[in-house]
Amino acid sequence: MSEFGVGDTDFLLDGRPVRLLSGALHYFRVHEAQWGHRLAMLRALGLNCVETYVPWNLHEPGPGVFRDVEAVGRFLDAVREAGLWAIVRPGPYICAEWENGGLPHWLTGRLRTRDERFLRPVEDWFRRLLPEVVSRQADRGGPVILVQVENEYGSYGSDAEYPGRLADLLRSGGITVPLCTSDGPEDHMLGGGSVPGVLATVNFGSDARGAFEALRRHRSGGPLMCMEFWCGWFDHWGGEHVVRDPAEAAATLREILECGASVNLYMAHGGTSFAGWAGANRGGGVMHDGPLEADVTSYDYDAPVDEYGAPTEKFWRLREVLAEYADGPLPALPPAPPALRGPAEVRLTGWASLSAVLEARGGPERTRPVPPTFEELDVDRGLVRYEVTVPGPRQPYPLTVRGLRDLAVVYVDGERAGVLTEDDDRLERPVAGHARVQLWVESLGRVNYGPRTGEPKGITGGLLHERQFLHGVRARGLRLDALDDIEGIGFRSPPGDGAPGLYRATVEVRGAGDACLDLPGWTRGFVWINGFNLGRYWSAGPQRSLYVPGPVLREGVNEVWVLELEGASAGPGPLLRGR
């Protein structure tokens, strides 16, 4: 057992000053069988600590319905086995480019405030989660040395009582190690997010001295720490791939350490937002109130340890800096995970239309005067089919979808009529009545940062024919996790035109290992291998292939399911290959 504390100028481990050299690694973005390898890579980088968020929505998909909360404890046990300390950031809000910033879609009340309709579910969640952390604190022989209160709250709100209430919940739940907060290095952020008596830390990507000066304006004492040193960045669908110069990142890391500060590399290893859990941001500059920018599936983050677990040039540049602050020689790199030997063609064997899939796996159909949202249909990740009748006879008028979030493929009397988005919400061709209109609406990820966190998905403003609202909307949701098993779905031979639907396929593997999946000619959808959801693919780029963890594959025949939502062009099928 060890005693970890916060001194006047340093962190203290059993009374001796210690500097935290930490790296972010999210257990939920790494296949569990690969935790040990990734943690060993962090040690080889020169780190003595690992930081992880805990996504509430992953573990409580419905009120009081908990799913594998024990994974948190298993990860912390793996951290201890790797010889690292741990920083745990349980939220309830985490950002992390994760769906809804980690907040469940079913929450009500004013999010991230003292509103009891929000705080009561938080209390229930902490009551279930905290035992996994409490028993693994340093003073009980475990690796946990710091627990964070909320996350960058000063960027969102100023309800000072709210983070204080969370700190009390953590303490009453058994957290005895030091608590901390983390915020941007601006006065309103540090003022809004800090909690009296709780260590404050700052997040930034450059100008370490300026950031720490801002922190000292608010806290004259306590150890300096950058809780998030952004050594890379994330990508959006339809945007450019973002990279940061390794030498520049290493120079900023050196500046942080020369200030005598502790640091957490965000990310040290990013991993993958499997199963459609990637979030979204709002553009529009500092207001974060502009167009939706959906996060890609890969969370490589241009990190020193890439998505496949391999060291990058940035790894070696940062390692050179960190080696100067190590107690001794750094560990050697662990053996690389096995990679797939040779390419393997994915052979399509069956197909089911979206309507057939919805019939077999969808929720109940509901008819409402106005379109129900995804939240009202209990759809966290997935899509909803809205149906409405344009009465007639009437002449052609424009059909507009108000408040569309996020994307709709529209059919009029069974014929595809177009694809609509939030910024392009009117069909190009007017619609005459009498007509039957179907809109397959997909969520591209809930906003994970800024004032529009928690906004609903689906058709949120109504359907207009000219200026008249169309009422009597029928809606049926399809949750993405309903397709983790496809038993009972009726398949027939794949069509030759690449029609939308669920494709069944096989791929034969010899020499299983880490791989990537290419989908040339496919537009947008999701892929499962042996029941494991790899995440969203989209021809919009910049991501061009999906990472396939080696433990997902097996020798011989593997099952592949592809849910194509818009349509694929004729040409080669998906291809599984080594990196």
Image: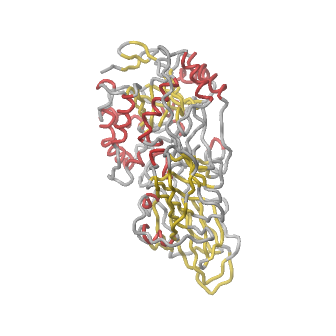
Q: Residue 403 at x, y = what percent?
A: 58, 62
Residue at image x 58%, y 73%? 469
**In the picture, residue 441 is in which quadrant?**
bottom right
Q: Is residue 547 above or below residue 224?
A: below
Instruction: Using the image as rendered, state which of residue 441 and residue 558 is in the foreground.
Output: 558
Q: Residue 48 at x, y = what percent?
A: 45, 23
Q: Does residue 220 appear in this view?
A: yes
Q: Does residue 197 appear in this view?
A: no
Name, please, the residue furthest toward the bottom: 393
Q: Is residue 126 above or below residue 201?
A: below
Name, please, the residue furthest toward the top: 16
Instruction: Using the image as rendered, state which of residue 555 and residue 160 is in the foreground.
Output: 555
Name, please, the residue furthest toward the right: 428
Residue at image x 60%, y 49%? 545
Q: Residue 173 at x, y = what percent?
A: 30, 35
Image quadrant in which the N terminus is located: top left
